[in-house]
Image (cartoon, coloured by chain):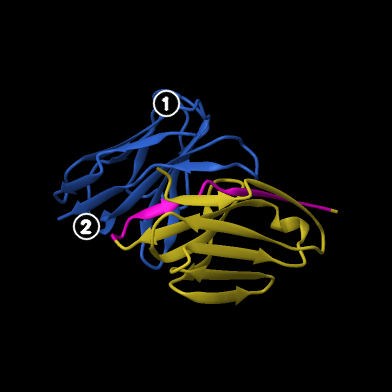
Chain colours: A yellow, B blue
């Protein structure tokens, strides 16, 4: 079965607002990455976490291995934030599992 | 749910040998992608395809060729494998050619070039 459940699958925000994306894991993961896909298919690294939280500009991510989830918070959303965001989690057996992605649309 | 299957799951190759990594998807997606995943680099795009018969260079195409003989299949070819190509390779298919495309990933192929 799927090891990573990412939600929501689609999200629409107005400029200036914020929300959170979430990945739940069915098993203990030792690290998580968040990516954003550009229009060509390249995946841009946003965060890598083995624990705790990290913040970069208007993005903040948290990872709780014990509770089996990770979040990506976006605040003050801008039009250029639109795109698809993915989480990928690494298991204790060093296998990488991907979420199915969240399509974010930021509207004026 | 989209199914993307990669083969082999593990491969050991010798320097200078030819390696072919295969990817099959069963959801009739037009777009397919090959990435490699290395510590410190995240996922890097090697080649991609818009549909059967098309291949496009990604961000790191050198040393790799790709082939898309059908909608379902997308192969990554290393004509002369080198140790620097030791990595984990992921194939993905995409459901739309827009910035909001969702990607569905295979389980990865671990390649070791000795």
Chain assignment, label 2: B
User: Where residue B83 is drawn, which disc sits there?
Assistant: 2
Mark 2 Cα-neighbour bin, 10 Å: few <14, some 14–19, many ≥20: some
In magenta segment, residue A98: yes
Q: Position of residue B100 (x, y in %)?
A: 65, 44
Mark 1 Cα-neighbour bin, 10 Å: few <14, some 14–19, many ≥20: many
Q: Nearer the viewer, residue A97 or B58?
A: A97
The stretch of residues the image draws in magenta is A93-107
- Residue furthest front in the image: A67
Q: Position of residue B67 (x, y in %)?
A: 37, 32
Along the polypeptide, which appears first: circle 2 or circle 1? 1
User: Where residue B72 is drawn, which disc sits there?
Assistant: 1
Q: Nearer the viewer, residue B35 or A30?
A: A30
Q: Position of residue A65 (x, y in %)?
A: 44, 68
Q: Nearer the viewer, residue A50 or B48?
A: A50
Chain assignment, label 1: B
Q: Main secondary structure of the magenta part?
A: strand
Residue in the picture at 53% in, 61% down:
A34
Residue in the picture at 31% in, 63% down:
A92
In magenta segment, residue A58: no
Q: Position of residue B15 (x, y in %)?
A: 16, 51
Residue in the picture at 48% in, 66% down:
A67
């Amino acid at each position: 079965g799927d090891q990573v459940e990412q939600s929501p699958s689609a999200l629409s925000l107005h400029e200036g607002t914020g929300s959170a994306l979430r990945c739940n894991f069915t098993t203990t993961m030792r690290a998580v990455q968040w990516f954003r896909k550009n229009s060509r298919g390249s995946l841009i690294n946003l965060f890598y976490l083995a624990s705790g939280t990290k913040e970069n500009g208007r993005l903040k991510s948290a990872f709780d291995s014990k509770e089996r989830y990770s979040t990506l918070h976006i605040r003050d959303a801008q039009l250029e934030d639109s795109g698809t965001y993915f989480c990928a989690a690494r298991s204790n057996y060093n296998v990488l599992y991907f979420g199915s992605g969240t399509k974010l649309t930021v509207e004026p | 749910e989209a199914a993307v299957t990669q083969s082999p799951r593990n491969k050991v190759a010798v320097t200078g040998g030819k390696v072919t990594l295969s990817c099959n998807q069963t959801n009739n997606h037009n777009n397919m992608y090959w990435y490699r995943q290395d510590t410190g680099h995240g996922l890097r795009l090697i080649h991609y395809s818009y549909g059967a018969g098309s291949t496009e260079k990604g961000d790191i195409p050198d040393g790799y060729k790709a082939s898309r003989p059908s909608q379902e299949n997308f192969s990554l070819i290393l004509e002369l494998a080198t140790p620097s190509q030791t990595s984990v390779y992921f194939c993905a298919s995409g459901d739309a050619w827009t910035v909001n495309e969702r990607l569905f990933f295979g389980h990865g192929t671990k390649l070791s070039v000795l």
